[in-house]
Amino acid sequence: MTTTARPGFDPELKAGLAIVGGVFPPTITPDLIAFMRKSYASPPIADTLRRRGIVRRDEVIAGHHGDAIEVSVLTPAQANGPRPCVLFLHSGGLIFGDRFSGADLVLDWVDQLGTVLVAVEYRLAPEFPDPVPREDCYAAAEWVAASAEHLGVRPDRLFVAGASSGGGLAAGLALAARDRGGPHLCGQVLDYPMLDDRGLTRSTHQFDGIGVWDRVSNETGWTALLGDARGGADVSPYAAPARATDLRGLPPAFIDVGSAEIFRDEAIAYADAIWNAGGDAELHVWPGGFHAFDIFAPHTVLAQGMIRTRNAWVEKILVD
């Protein structure tokens, strides 16, 4: 019997994996989507904001094809004058999660760095396959740019951020904004992004049935979004940014990923492709990190280092 060689988990993170598995099983098949929509639902946002100096208001805007979608606008309580703005795209494999999933970490940018944050309730697959989720996000970016004065944001300091599937959507949005002459983005934060529907990388096959979000889970998410087109020749790079052949002219990118997860190799390849195109990318590979360990184990030493590094990059981008 042979075993798959793979990086081990950071000891502190490994201790928490058993707890994570109770709400987020390593292997997610289509029959578990309904369960995941309950178990991965974000806590009440009012509780999350209770000890923060943040004002929230909800708006209904036009998403793809003009259909109504919700966004939340989160503003520093003491804000005065135009502020930088981040468009936040949540995680959840394109099939679950809501606009506040994983938002705890990016809320620090609001009450500590003074940004406005717009969280997008993009529609989910499989009920809404490609291009609906990504075009909902793009519509939200256009709305922010067109509503800059109303929202109190600086149109020259709009950036996009997302984790996992949200990271893939953020990368696709940056590509689309470049190609369509859309909103000017000053940066893109791609946390362990879901970039490639083809599942060809070594890291994809190193993590089957282990950690958080394995190969089968990834196939479940991509198939929900793309159907029979998954892995074929006709997938848009705006849906799967790893397929983009031209990465010139993109905003600076921050990319981070754990060494012990399936998205490791595609994240590294995407940063490398940006560099080869003459672009600006800052890449961090966190040793022994499983997928989304900053969300599931934010108290750990590794996660604290990741969060500090990411926040420092965002602060730098905002003042450049």
Image (tube, rainbow, N blue to C red):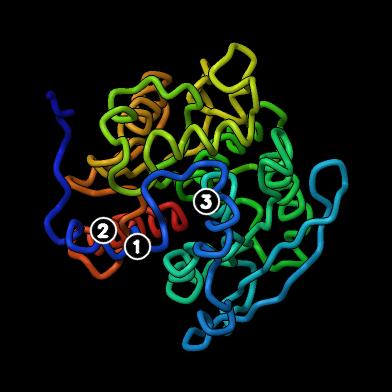
Q: Quadrant of the N terminus?
A: top left
* Type of amino acid under label 1: Phe
Q: Which mark is residue 153?
A: none
Q: Secondary structure at mark 3?
A: loop
Which one is in front, 222 or 18? Answer: 18
Kind of residue sitting beneath label 2: Leu
Q: Residues within 10 Å of mark 1 (few under 14, many from 20)?
A: some
Residue 256 is left or right of residue 289, and the answer is right
Q: CA distance from mark 2 to mark 1?
A: 9 Å
Query: At 88% across and 47% down in the image, what residue appears?
Result: 66
Identify the secondary structure beneath mark 2.
helix
Q: Which residue is mark 3?
A: 92
List the residue tagged with mark 1: 296
> Residue, x 17% and y 33% (percent of image)?
6
The residue sitting at 52% across, 32% down in the picture is 250
| Residues at circles 2 and 1 in contact by the CB criterion of under 8 Å | no
181 to 57, vertically: above or below: above
In the image, what residue type sits under mark 3? Answer: Gly
- For mark 2, what is the residue? 17
Relative horizontal placement of residue 242, taking residue 225 as reference (left or right): left
Answer with the quarter of the image where residue 12 lies: bottom left
Query: What is the x, y in percent for residue 202?
Result: 28, 23
Q: Secondary structure at mark 1?
A: helix
Is residue 49 visible in the rendered structure shown here?
A: yes
Toward the top, the furthest residue is 233
Could you tell me how far apart the alpha carbons at marks 1 and 3 are, in whole angstroms? 13 Å
Measured Cα–Cα span from mark 2 to mark 3:
18 Å
